[in-house]
Image (cartoon, rainbow, N blue to C red):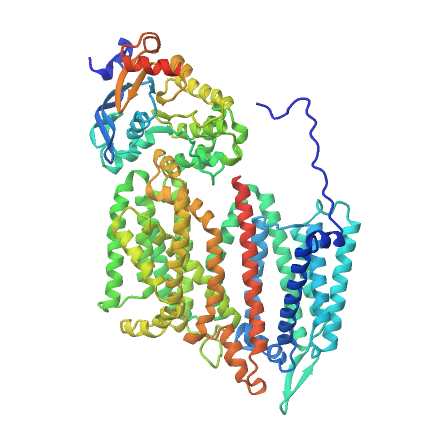
Amino acid sequence: MSDASVGVQRTVAPEVALPSPGRWIRDNLFSSITNSVQTVVFTVILLGLLRWALGLVFAEDTDWTAVATNMRLLFTYNYPTAQYGRIWVATGTVLAAVGASCGAWNINPGMTVRRLSVSGTGTGAFLLVIGVITPASTPSSIRTWIVIIGTALVLISLTALRIVDKPHRRSVSFASLLVTFGVAVVAFLWLFPFGNYGFTQGAVYAEPGLVAESTRVPWTVLMAIVVSAFFLGRETVRRLGEAGGLIRRSLTVFWVVGPLFLVFLVLRDPAFDMGYVLRVDIPIAAGFVLAGAVLISLLGQPARAELARIVGAVLAAGAVFNWMAGFMGWYPMLQKVRISFALLALLVLLLPTLAGERAARLRLMGLWAVAMVIFHWLITGMNTPSTLEIAAPPFLGGFVLTVTIAYYVMLASFPVGVLLALARTSKLPIFRVLATGYIEVIRGVPLITVLFFFSIMLPLFLPRGMGISDLAAVFAGYAVFSAAYMAENIRGGLQSVRHGQFEAADALGLTTVQRTGLIVLPQALRVSIPNLVGQAIATFKETSLIAIVGGFDLLRIANATIPNQPDFLGQKRPGLLFISLIYFVFAYSMSRASQNLETRLGSARA
Amino acid sequence: MSIADRALTSEMASRPDMIQCRGVKKWFGDFQALCGVDLTVKEREVMVVLGPSGSGKSTLIRCINRLEVHQEGQIVVDGVELTNDLRNIEKIRSEVGMVFQLFNLFPHLSVLDNVTLAPIWVRKQPKAQAEIRAMELLERVGIPEQAAKFPGQLSGGQQQRVAIARSLAMNPKIMLFDEPTSALDPEMISEVLDVMKALAADGMTMIVVTHEMGFAREVADRLVFMEAGDVVEVGTPETFFTNPTEERTKLFLSQIL
């Protein structure tokens, strides 16, 4: 049984030496006549394409000042300059959460020195090629810089390969990669003060240092925040052990509600009427906190599970009636009270599954109180007028709008998609029919139709006194659309869970809800990750359709706003190329992150 | 004496019934898997079910915790009859442990979490208490050092022992074993059988579907031979192996021994 096989000498696998570049080229590119011909032909084609693309970038009629001047517009649309500190606070919070999450979950995509050097050599060589084949219209200073950086990369990488002993065994940690990246960004901003563009009598002039000066201090602080948040998250979780779970849970909560807080309370800065808040909002929230606590303590005991189911059903019926009354306009009631009431009904319905001994009940009460406070605070903030002085109404635009919509569409359509997938695979015909109908109808309609319906038609159908903002309408339509696709992706994962898992869960006496939540879904979602990330990428890119229904997202700014500015009439190309780069960087990062996630989850299983 | 109570010693006959099957019939489509099975299992009895594949052994024990639904007849487990009433089913399932041929451990949970899951969520035990109990059970099946690993990192024998610990964590009154060693490499069979023997010695009521004749002879109080959905013969290990009454039993034994 023991693994130590007596008498057998175990040896380390022999080292595979990295072939020299010349050797590698001979082995892989010119190994035979056919191979050589293919290499030459495709190299020529690729170089031709590259030169054509470079021609677009460096053409004489491509005015890059159109992008450089409109950076603020592209990223934050017409957010007031005086309030720009809010943007930095929001960005800083998100970046701190990113750093802390990487640290807390020990996301450590380190690289071996060999891989780093090989990709460095490749990138450097590519830059050299670009430097050589750029069209004549390229400014010579840019060409010189490309060649210098390319040569430096190649030289540094090759030297690293030579100097470092056993480069494929030496790993460069994620932390040092992160620090290097941060230092590089900061150094660039401080050392190369690129200019801000202005106009006098129609002629562009550059004022040295303005852009760098206004952004280099915030970016230095932000990079320091990311790096220190990473180490802070990693060390606290490592030191605290068991309690580290609390930090992970808080970070998870942040990722669900944090961005909403940042958008509606930090960026939008509502002007709270404190008298009204004290008189109305706080009593309502406190009432629901209290009601939830009483119901949990009364119905949460395992012996009262049956009663809890009955009370839950009654409350749910009440909540449905409440909504109908809202649509019919029978009696006035604050929207948030209706939603809170529905949440209360859901809580009671889930009590038999969630509650148990005293400690579990107390924990649930705490959770409910926190959830209610957050919910009411947010809703009140959203319903309060903004203090921002913005000429045109949308306070969100540009990159911020794209990211916010994409993030929340994914977040909102995820639970809906899970429920739809479960309903579609349910044994109960009514759920199955409803879910299948929903999915097939939505999948049969183009996204743009759904967006038009929600932004133009929906407000007409709503009862009097019930309004919906443009942003909310677009968001709702997109989430409804995305949920159908999400459901199909998750259904694929559900079908991959083996039948034995259901039987084992049943044999242990788990209820259907527990079986689904604890056994089936975790396994199904793991299988669905590649598809879900694919959908996330698609969602992120398709947010550009918001432009058609009136949102000022990246695409609309690049395609319509900038080309209509008197100084850049008709200049579409630089803007479109630039936003393509932004889309690519984010989509590619998501794709890499998903590969990383799959490896992590896969290694936990094997 | 009905076939269900045959071969009981007088001491055993005086014990209360844990499981009673009366005329249990089950069809899969047109195929009849169980043709009116009568069987009684007494408290602390170890019953081993033998028979060729397709004889309905697995179907029978899967009916006892309602993983399969019988269409006719009656099954009473610990005084509760199995009907469509959901509460009865949940109650019986939490009293009856089951060990599967393919282990069916939860691959996304660590060994410890596999064992504590049901006590925490079904019995509503505090986590700390459930973990102490789980470690005791892992000790008992001989693999406490594997608690933090994931099922995929264990050998088949170890996985099956975790599966046994997982069932025991619910403090079941009855344990059902559905060919627990059939998917194991030969050198791992004995480690699982040893655990089962210890369990039998502790007085657990067990129904074991198996092809391990050595185990059957050593541990079983009674042996049941099934063929084509019917109980053919019930006997003590001595009479069953040395002097079976039915022709079909003799034929089966001559093929496997």
Q: Is residue A183 left or right of residue A543?
A: right
Camera-side residue of A520 and B95:
A520
Quarter placement of the N terminus of chain A:
top right
Residue A606, x across and y down, in percent? 53, 39
Q: Is residue A14 above or below residue A470?
A: above
Residue A191 seen in the current view: no
Camera-side residue of A226 and A170:
A170
Q: Is residue A124 left or right of residue A350?
A: right
Q: Is residue A32 left or right of residue B186?
A: right
Camera-side residue of B25 and A359:
B25
Residue furthest front as drawn: A33
Q: Residue at x 40, y 43 (%)?
A: A520
Residue B201, x across and y down, in percent? 40, 16
Residue A260, x across and y down, in percent? 46, 63
Residue A207, x across and y down, in percent? 69, 82
Q: Is residue A443 above or below residue A364?
A: below
Q: Residue at x 45, y 50 (%)?
A: A528
Q: Residue at x 49, y 56 (%)?
A: A533
Residue B22 seen in the current view: yes
Q: How many marks?
A: 0
Q: Is residue A210 left or right of residue B191?
A: right
